[in-house]
Image: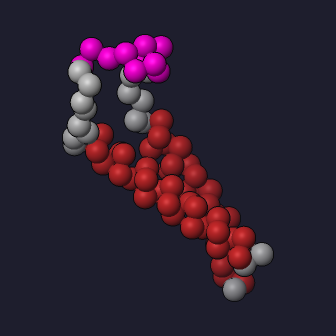
Amino acid sequence: MVLIHSLLPGVQVILSILLVGAILLQARGAGLGGAFGDSSEGSFYKRRGAELFLFRSSIILAILFTLSSIVALLTA
């Protein structure tokens, strides 16, 4: 239990930095038109390659951060 209390803040900091980085690297349609759904690419879009990896890794990092926050609440 003491090990969890000592390691958990560091794990949460690392996960939060990785999550912010993964989200910021996904910047797509950064213009004002992209915010309102105006795109000339068509209505369907499929992620491929590195963009798919960033998308999936951001989901996994968000889940891990949420689980670590729940563990921190339960062990407090």
Considering only vertical position in the picture, is 37 above or below 5? above
Relative horizontal placement of residue 48, taking residue 5 as reference (left or right): left
Q: Position of residue 56 (x, y in %)?
A: 35, 51
Q: How many marks?
A: 0
Assign the N terminus to one quadrant of the image.
Answer: bottom right
Relative horizontal placement of residue 75, taking residue 68 as reference (left or right): right
Which range is magenta? 32-41
Task: Name the residue nearer the viewer: 34 or 26.
Answer: 34
Model colouring = secondary structure
Instruction: Please report the residue visible at 25 percent of the width from the left and 39 percent of the height from the top.
Output: 47
- Outermost bottom residue: 1
Q: Position of residue 22 (x, y in %)?
A: 44, 44
Assign the C terminus to one quadrant of the image.
Answer: bottom right
- Outermost front residue: 43
Residue 36 in the magenta stretch? The answer is: yes
Considering only vertical position in the picture, is 19 above or below 7? above
Instruction: Please report the residue visible at 43 percent of the width from the left and 13 percent of the height from the top.
Output: 33
Choose top left, top right, bottom left or bottom right for residue 70.
bottom right
Q: Position of residue 44 (x, y in %)?
A: 24, 30
